[in-house]
Amino acid sequence: MTAFANGETQTPEWLINCELRSVNHRYCDISLKLPESLRFLEGDIRKRLGNALKRGKIECTINYKTLDLAQDFQINSEAVNALLAATAAIEQNMSHAAPFSALEVLAFPGIQQQNDIDRAQLKNVILALLDDVIQRMIATREQEGQQLGQMIEQRCEKISLLIQQAETRMPTVLKNLRQKLTERIQEMVQEPDFDRLEQELVMQAQKLDVDEELDRLKTHVEEVQRVLKQNEPIGRRLDFLMQEMNREANTLGSKSADQEMTTIAIELKVLIEQMREQIQNIE
């Protein structure tokens, strides 16, 4: 969601500049920076941005200046006369009053006036420019998204390999568990109760059973790969899938019965966290 785009357009009357910045955010948060004379466009601008961009903290800045200064610049003669009259009255009570310069007079509120702008024409020009800048931002986001998609796909492939390793390792884990239990019982009693041994082995095997966790991890990986191919906003769904995958990896680690399974669980969590961090950039 991190992106930047800007654009500029010129008409015989105006020079208009538009700038868009976007950073990561869970929802779509739009912030507008407009001159007061363009506040009438705020609703239209928000609607256009909201329709095109679904996630991210978006900052939109639009400025314009009038090219025909002769038409734009006017003096409020009545305000000037009132100001000078008030100044003359004040000077009568002051012994060393300094006269106003022309620039100082112009600085007073209400002295300068602007002609009424053609709002309909200005609206059309600004919204056309905004649409163009939005498309530039989307193109930048899509380019970054393609790179992120490749990275996530690579992590999914690594996770699939780790799942296969865990499935291959489980029979060895149970075999080692049986051997340990047998040796422990033989140390405790002269005539081991092998029926009791089988019962204990079944109970331990149930506690260590990670088939469900591995199956769910495979399902989540397949769903991530499917979602990546969709041509629509997918960030929130991927966020949810990362939460679910992390939960399964944590359970796998808690059930680990040997060093290799623990290592697999840790590697899974590292890969999932790497994906989670990058998914924050995806709309």
Image (cartoon, grey):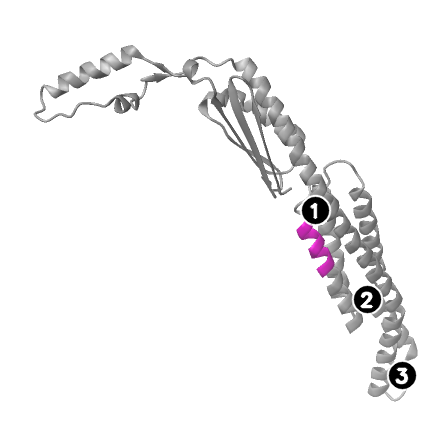
Residue type at numbered disc 3: Pro
Magenta segment's dominant SS is: helix
Q: Secondary structure at mark 3?
A: loop
Circle 2 crowding by C-alpha within 10 Å: few under 14, some 14–19, many from 20? some
- The residues bearing labels 1 and 3 have C-alpha atoms spaced at a distance of 52 Å
Q: Which residue is mark 2?
A: 208
Q: Nearer the viewer, mark 2 or mark 3?
A: 2
Of the pair 232 and 182, the residue shown nearer to us: 232
Image quarter in which the N terminus is found: top right
**Label 2 or label 3, whichever comes before in sequence order:** 3
Answer whether residue 173 is visible to the viewer in this image: yes
Q: Which residue is mark 1?
A: 239
Task: Between residue 106 and residue 238, name the one nearer to us.
Answer: 106
Question: What is the span of residues highlighted in magenta in the rendered image?
Answer: 270-279
Q: Residues within 10 Å of mark 1 (few under 14, many from 20)?
A: some
x and y, in percent, of residue 152 in the image: 75, 51
Residue 154 x, y percent position in the rendering? 79, 54
| Residue for badge 3 | 192
Residue beneath the point at 24% across and 12% down:
81
**Tally of marks:** 3
